[in-house]
Amino acid sequence: MAVRDNYAPEGLMKYLKRGIVGYRLLTPVHQQRLARHIWLHGVWYKRHKHPEWGDYMSITWQELEKDFGRGGFNAINESLHLFEVTPNWYMDKGQTKGYKLSPLVAEIKERYLRPRKRAPIQLIDSQGRALRALPQPVAAKTKNSNNQEITATAWKDAKPLNKIPVDMEILRALYTHLQHMMQQDTDDMFAHAQQEDYRYITEAVSQLLIMAQTDVAGQGYIMHRYTEARSGRLYAKGVSLQTTPRLIRQAALHGLYEYDFENCHYSIFSQLAAKYGLETEAISYYLTNKKAVREKLAEDIGISLDQVKMCLLAIMYGARDNTWHESAIPNEIGPINAQALYSHPLFQGIDGDIKEGRRVILDSWPTRRTTLVPVLDEKRIRKDEKPEKKLAHLLQGIEALALRAVIKAIPHDVLLLMHDGFVTSKRVNAKELERVVREATGYKMSLSGERISFPADLHF
């Protein structure tokens, strides 16, 4: 990974030097890399997937070995006591342990994150050097199907902007409101659970406020840097607006415009299956009655609409219909609710369409000697990969192709890429963009959009 993706605020490093005995004796490179892991603790995509390790972050042993050498992190951590580490490993896309900030480090980070007037903030890269200019929006390197690092080219002609304006006044008001909610004196067990959520959201707001005051992006702008996944999908690195909770995005991007491809992957899947001769009746019904289907499932199972959406997306990506507590759906809604969901006729119909459609699509998709013909030129996937992985790769590739077409059509309006949508600086012609996308991909994809607004009273 390029060093410009792996930054840490210089101010946090200064706080750690003052508060942690021995930290200042480390090399500047090791100081930065430790500060970066501390900075990312609590960020959504770094939170550990183990159902009982909610306060821990996930760091692979490969990351730690690359940053500190074999055994280097353990030696430093035993000396400085920066992280509490779980004794056991957890298998989730590779073996990881859980890492949680020690009480002292957590207190130091909390003090650094408190909003205040700041001089322009410097970002330090993983070689201990200050960033002097905004890096290119898309990292120059990505991984191929053999997990080898190669030059990224899928977005070379359609790069999104890497500097996003945010509403700092509303972010500060949200921070104040969250602080007030956390200070509510109650013995209600559910209120305590909410306070934990408020703590994570408050920290995320503080991090965005810091990132909106860097010298490279300028006051009121947040730097974004993306990396290409193997499918072509772009993922924002570090602290970003792409993965932050919706509540915070509403505050940060108040007044801008957000557009989404409606039921993106289900829509593409249905058209792909039809292309190869399979009519997916249950999915077609879902696509034309999305609100009613979601509400029916939520009411009958006793789960939220957001949980229904997560479960429906999970089966599209290959989630198994079992009740093991660490599987995706039981982990989200509990084993009893998962069993009820699997038995529901609406869910069974959709799940059946996905399983049959996956088989038909992959059997019909053109292949080369050892790979599937890619959606994006260099984004190959091996024929011997699991069917669920191959289908996800194709769907995400078509999604990426659609977003790339949008950026080519309105390059000066797009500010932020989501995975199945985007944020613009002004209202755009959605029907015209639907036409552009259909010409570029061959698939009909409906765009819906609205102006982003945050409630004036901050109730949520």
Image: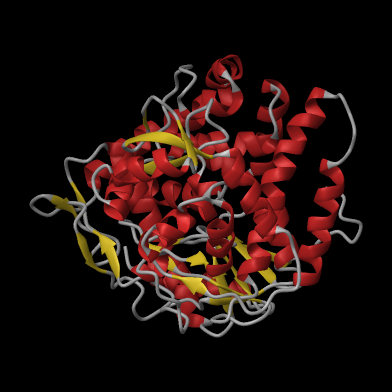
The residue lying toward the viewer, choosing from 29 and 54, is 29
The residue lying toward the viewer, choosing from 81 and 339, is 81
Residue 386 position, x and y percent, is 26, 37
The residue lying toward the viewer, choosing from 295 and 162, is 162
Q: Quadrant of residue 446?
A: bottom right
The residue under the point 39% across, 58% down is 26
The residue under the point 44% across, 75% down is 137
- Asked whether, in this view, residue 392 is left or right of residue 381, the answer is right
- Asked whether, in this view, residue 151 is left or right of residue 428, the answer is left
Residue 343 position, x and y percent, is 55, 17
The residue under the point 64% across, 78% down is 428
Position of residue 413 relative to residue 189, above or below, is: below
Residue 442 position, x and y percent, is 39, 65
The residue under the point 46% across, 54% down is 23
Say if residue 51 shows up in the picture. Answer: yes
Q: Quadrant of residue 389?
A: top left
Say if residue 234 shows up in the picture. Answer: no
